[in-house]
């Protein structure tokens, strides 16, 4: 995957993580408000289950995001090392 594709994938993953976390927040708020009004567990449970599913999705998406960030960082480090490999370290000057 080239750098442009990685950048686009990172943006999309960030968006997807936000959406999943928003789903968690919305479903937990619905469950909280229904429970506060005295709803029984059967009326609240579907919202809790959906929040759990959204949290699982956010966790999987975040793992993909973190893996891709690590890949981008490794690629950037490799490019930096390749560029600097031709120059001698500062303390290796024999005239110092």
Image: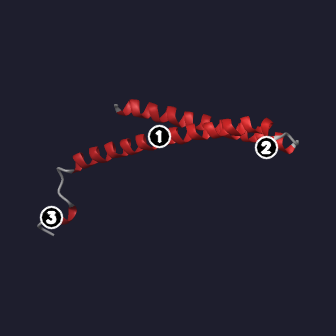
For the C terminus, the image quarter is bottom left
Q: Nearer the viewer, mark 3 or mark 1?
A: 1
Residue 90 lies left or right of residue 7; in this view the side is left
Give the left or right position of residue 4, taking residue 41 as reference.
left
Give the structural element (helix, strand or loop) at label 2. Answer: helix
Q: Residue furthest right?
A: 37
Mark seen at residue 93: 3
The single residue placed furthest to the front in the displayed view is: 42
Rendering coords of residue 56 (x, y %): 57, 40
Between the residue at mark 2 and the residue at mark 3, the CA separation in whole angstroms equals 68 Å
Residue drawn at point x = 56 percent, y = 33 percent: 16
Mark-to-mark CA distance, 1 and 2: 30 Å
Q: Left or right: 32 with respect to 49?
A: right
Marking on residue 65:
1
Q: Which mark is residue 19?
A: none
As rendered, which of 29 and 45 lies closer to the eye?
45
For label 2, the crowd category at 10 Å Cα-Cα, with few meaning under 14, some 14 to 19 and many 20 or more, is some
Q: Which residue is mark 2?
A: 32
| Horizontal side of residue 26 vs 15, given as left or right | right
């Amino acid at each position: 995957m080239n750098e442009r594709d990685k950048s686009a994938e990172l943006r999309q993953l960030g968006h997807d993580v936000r959406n999943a976390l928003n789903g968690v927040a919305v479903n937990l708020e619905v469950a909280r408000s229904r429970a506060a009004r005295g709803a029984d567990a059967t009326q609240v449970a579907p919202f809790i289950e959906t929040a759990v599913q959204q949290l699982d999705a956010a966790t999987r998406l975040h793992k993909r995001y973190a893996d891709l960030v690590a890949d981008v960082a490794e690629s950037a480090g490799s490019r930096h090392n390749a560029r600097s490999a031709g120059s001698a370290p500062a303390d290796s000057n024999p005239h110092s």
